[in-house]
Amino acid sequence: MNQVYNTVLWYLLQGGRHIDTAQLYLNHRPIGAAIKEAMQRGVSRDEIFVTTKIEGGTFGTNNTAAWIPQMLEELQLDYVDLVPPPRCVKHLQDTFQCREHLLITRPA
């Protein structure tokens, strides 16, 4: 995972501003550490657009509600900018409503 950290840090310090990750990739922790380091070096969090995706087993209200705080802790962030709706139609409504409720915590 050191390679992920180094690559994301380099990318952010070179001016990259969009991070696209997913629960399935198992790389939230090194990405979060790289974002934190970049912020300590002067990159503003407001300039970084972070996208992550929900893994199939995390669909539904209760699972999504439990996953979001864990994901934020792993990324060392107060918020993410985008969690696209899941492709699984069965739990789309519950997951989407839960995601909307819990992610409307972005600081003003």
Image (tube, helix red, strand yellow):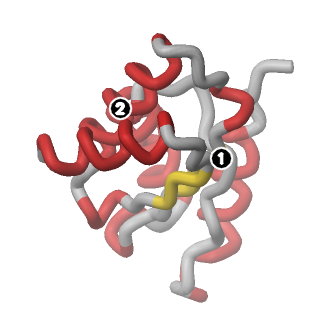
- Is disc 1 in contact with disc 2, using a CB cutoff of under 8 Å? no
Upstream in sequence: badge 1 or badge 2: 2
Q: Is residue 105 above or below residue 108?
A: below
Q: Secondary structure at mark 2?
A: helix
On the question of residue 70 being in view, the answer is: no
Question: Looking at the image, which is closer to me, 69 or 31?
Answer: 31
Name the disc covering residue 59, or none: none
Of the residues shown, which amino acid type is indicated by label 1?
A: Phe
Q: Position of residue 100 (x, y in %)?
A: 74, 50
Q: Residue furthest front?
A: 14
Q: Secondary structure at mark 1?
A: strand
Residue at the (51%, 53%) spot, across then down: 19
Check disc 1 and report the residue beneath it: 49
Q: Position of residue 66 (x, y in %)?
A: 42, 41
Q: Position of residue 36 (x, y in %)?
A: 42, 21
Q: Position of residue 93 (x, y in %)?
A: 70, 72
Check disc 2 and report the residue beneath it: 34
